[in-house]
Amino acid sequence: MQKHLGDILIAPRITEKASYMTAQGAYVFNVAMGANKIDIARAVRELYKVTPRMVRIVAVPRKAVMTRGTNRRGMTVAGKKAYVFLKKGETIEIV
């Protein structure tokens, strides 16, 4: 079954670490739980018209948290993120 590209790359991760890695030529994306490296590389190539050199995937675990106002326990959402390293000289414009 063919996966839709918009279902693979959920959103770019805009964090301090991701901003630092952008200067090194690596971009960080939230990706679908069922996505693999080949799917992610294909989606980046088609959507942003750049060539990924390497893709690394990291599982983001769920965590128990306390809410601030009501002191109730809750859980954060689990997910997956991908570090996409591009060829030298290529960039992605993330707004």
Image (cartoon, rainbow, N blue to C red):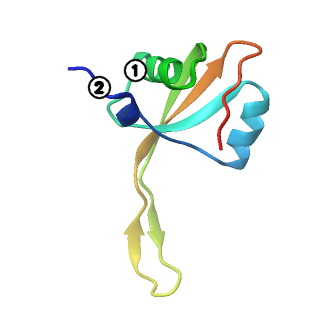
Instruction: Give the SS element for disc 2.
Output: loop
The residue that mark 1 highlights is 39
Binning the other alpha carbons within 10 Å of mark 1 as few (below 14), some (14 to 19) or many (20 upward) gives some
Give the number of the disc on residue 72.
Answer: none
Residue displayed at 51% across by 87% down: 69
Identify residue type, mark 2: Lys
Rendered view: 90 above or below 16: above
Residue 55 at x, y = what percent? 54, 20
Seen in the image, is 50 located left or right of residue 8?
right
User: What is the quadrant of residue 2 in the picture?
Assistant: top left
Quote the CA–CA distance across marks 2 and 1: 8 Å
Residue 75 at x, y = what percent? 39, 63
Residue displayed at 57% across by 18% down: 49
Report the number of discs.
2
Rendered view: 10 above or below 56: below
Give the number of the disc on residue 3.
Answer: 2
Q: Residue furthest left?
A: 1
Q: Earlier in the sequence, mark 2 or mark 1?
A: 2
Binning the other alpha carbons within 10 Å of mark 2 as few (below 14), some (14 to 19) or many (20 upward) gives few
74 or 46, nearer to the observer: 46
Q: Nearer the viewer, mark 2 or mark 1?
A: 2
User: What is the quadrant of residue 39 in the picture?
Assistant: top left
Identify residue type, mark 1: Asp
Seen in the image, is 6 located left or right of residue 41?
left
Instruction: Give the SS element for disc 1.
Output: helix
Tag 2 near tag 1, CB within 8 Å: yes
Residue displayed at 67% across by 48% down: 15
70 or 55, nearer to the observer: 55
55 or 60, nearer to the observer: 55
Residue 1 at x, y = what percent? 20, 20
Q: Name the quarter where the C terminus is drawn.
A: top right
Residue 16 at x, y = what percent? 73, 48
